[in-house]
Image: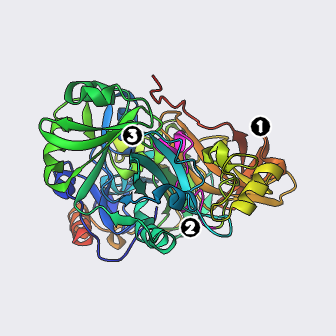
Amino acid sequence: MVLNSLASKKTIFYDSHIAAHGNMVPFAGYLMPVNYSAGIIKEHLHTRSNAGLFDVCHMGQILIKGKNAIPSLEKLIPVDLDALKINQQLYSVFTSPDGGVLDDLIITRWAEDCFFLVVNATCKDQDLEHLKRYITACDISLMPHQSLMALQGLRAVEIMSELAPEAASLQFMHGCCSDINGIACYITRSGYTGEDGFEISVADEYALELSAHLLSYDYCQWIGLGARDSLRLEAGLCLYGHDMDKNTSPIEASIGWSISRSRRTGGSKAGGFLGSDLILQQFSHGVKKRRVGFVVDGRSPVREGADITDSNGQIVGKITSGGFGPTLQAPIAMGYVSEENSNEGSRLDAIVRGKPLPIKVARMPFVNQRYYRG
Amino acid sequence: MEDVVYTKEHEWLKVGSDSITVGVTDHAQQQLGDVVYVELPDLETEFVAGDEAVIIESVKAAGEITIPFDGVVVEINETLVEQPDLLNTAPQTEGWMFRVVPKDKFDVSKFMNLEEYLAYVQDGEQ
């Protein structure tokens, strides 16, 4: 995790976290809960079987409005925004001129010429600068005084069907304006745990009241960043700054699927985004290394930074995320390996405390995703 | 004579008639969080004070337990390998880690008693 020694800000939920015995640490410039009194494993399992509420106010919520929003954004994001319906959303990335990834994000179409982006906390200021540098004809702003929370897990929909039935019938990666007990909010069926769930954007002044409504269900509780990390790892999802960054391309990061068909070679709007020459060349001709998942022999977790070696002891890659999967009751990891070692089933070693520990390339997600697709 | 003494590394040492039992304190397990893996030393390992004796991995981090005196490992708690969460649920009883016969006469005055240890923990939190 990225620790930040700068003065830490507090989200609107800070006092709620303290009341729930949150173990608060500086993260991306904010004091955030790693876990509460239940601990990471129980919080993780609770989310999978019940409902968990995550404070994600530290993430950036950016609004982009203007006549040229689509062609402007398509220069920075390799998706087809004309094809995106109002209230529909996509996972994508900001590519860099040399084909790397500047951040990953969720983009939602709010209106014909208006888009809502959720970006990583650690990147939000840099993302805003990037947008303003390349897009001059649109209004671009980091939404001030706007909170964001994620309600995730098997029973999240039960809560939503009582509080906001219109949101409970949304399909994965769709959103709607809603009203929960008189509080206006924007709800999407999305999240980063691999479970069904919702993200709720609401004005700061109503955020606490809304969280109280959600937490009034006895099967819904606060979940910290620790479980958020183990849930997304089991779901095979990338953590920006760890599993991909400006030095890895989307193809190397194994998220080439997120590039819209029309933006790929031969498509109606092929290329035309930062780094597209290199990225599309890699899409067609392959890459030298790529991100894969690993299962580990035994119980010892393999952590970020561990070298990966082949049977000759040659270094062929590096672990970028690793830990213990509470649902699987086993250590899991992801990392980059050379293409020839990246096939499912490839047997390799991770160097842990100076000793080789057998690992095997495994299919991701490690735990089946349960997104609601209607 | 104190029966159990404590180290600055948050270990407890239970002084028996011929060996010392080593474990981690409740404060240590709280700091570690959910323990998922414990690697114990081999029997008959001869340790010098300061050697790394046990590796503990929690969901969020890895930690090492060092031994604060010279001695030979005579028993390990193999239950911990299958049930590493005993370190969280019973750190000062069933979650003991290993027993050592000290090389020299064991000097309890080098360590803290419970009262001193609790004061030490409190200082660390301020």
Q: In what element is the residue under mark 2? A: loop
Q: Which residue is mark 1?
A: A345
Label 2 in the same subunit as label 1:
no
At 54% from the left edge and 30% from the top edge, which residue is drawn? A368
Note whether A168 is above or below A255 in the view shown. above
Residue A87: which numbered mark, if any? 3
Residue B108, position as x, y percentages in the image: 35, 67
Gap between marks 3 and 2, in whole Å? Answer: 59 Å
Q: Amino acid at mark 1?
A: Gly
**Nearer the observer, A7 or A330:** A7
At 36% from the left edge and 73% from the top edge, which residue is drawn? B110
* Image marks 3 and 1: residues in contact by CB distance under 8 Å: no
- Numbered disc in front, either 3 or 2: 3
- Numbered disc in front, either 2 or 1: 1
Q: In what element is the residue under mark 3? A: loop
At 67% from the left edge and 41% from the top edge, which residue is drawn? A297
Gap between marks 2 and 1, in whole Å? Answer: 38 Å
Q: Is residue A238 left or right of residue A152?
A: right
At 54% from the left edge and 58% from the top edge, which residue is drawn? A71
Magenta portion: prevailing SS class = loop
Ranked by sequence position, the earlier of labels 3 and 1 is 3
Residue A23, position as x, y percentages in the image: 29, 56
* Other-residue count near label 2 (Cα within 10 Å), few / some / many at <14 / 14–19 / ≥20: some
Does residue B90 appear in this view?
A: no
Label 3 in the same subunit as label 1:
yes
Residue B51: which numbered mark, if any? 2
Q: Which quarter of the picture shows residue A299?
A: top right
Q: Is residue A244 magenta?
A: yes
Q: Amino acid at mark 2?
A: Asp
Q: Which portion, as a residue range, is magenta? A: A231-246
Report the residue that reaches farthest toward the right: A312
Gap between marks 3 and 1, in whole Å? Answer: 40 Å
